[in-house]
Amino acid sequence: MIGYLYFAISGEYYNFVREITKYYPFSLFYKDRLFHAANKPYSDFMWDIEGTAKKNNVDIKVWNGHGFGETAEFYGTFKKRVANKDLAKINLEKILQEKFGTVYVRDNPKGFKVLVPMSLIVQN
């Protein structure tokens, strides 16, 4: 019971799962989740995107991402209501390009998507 509470309350469950999914047979579990060890570069880059935006007073939440081929896509939304979403996306793109270089912010039905070359994620 104490172990369950420790994992449930502290959030250490995801750190534990990230560590054990490095090794077989646990590596077969949760392959499609961001807390899998193989997906750590994606989750780290998502946090970098959020942190960079927050430093520049743009409050966003990046809630998903994946890579395929030479490009990775991250999906997010603005946390606060924005009067002009197109202008906010252009500003976000400028902020991210200053830090990462070749990063593009495009429209998505539920918010925006950030297109990133895989070379940036592997470096990070």
Image (cartoon, rainbow, N blue to C red):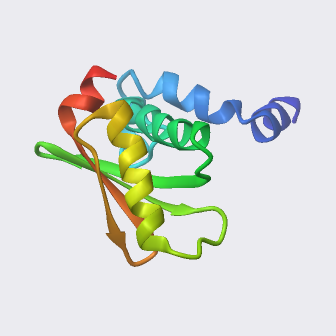
Front residue of 56/13: it is: 56
User: Is 101 above or below relative to 23?
Assistant: below
Q: Is residue 78 left or right of residue 11?
A: left
Q: Residue at x 43, y 28 (%)?
A: 21
Task: Tell me residue 76's x, y (percent).
Answer: 47, 59
Q: Residue at x 35, y 25 (%)?
A: 24
> Which quadrant of the figure contains the C terminus?
top left
Front residue of 111/2: it is: 111
Q: Residue at x 43, y 36 (%)?
A: 36
User: Is 37 above or below relative to 71?
Assistant: above
Front residue of 2/82: it is: 82
> Which quadrant of the figure contains the N terminus?
top right
Task: Tell me residue 45's x, y (percent).
Answer: 41, 35
Q: Is residue 16 left or right of residue 25?
A: right
Task: Tell me residue 70's x, y (percent).
Answer: 12, 42
Quadrant assignment, res 97: top left
Quadrant assignment, res 119: top left
Give the number of callouts: 0
Q: Residue furthest left?
A: 69
Q: Is residue 98 left or right of residue 63?
A: left
Q: Residue furthest right?
A: 2
Q: Residue at x 57, y 63 (%)?
A: 78
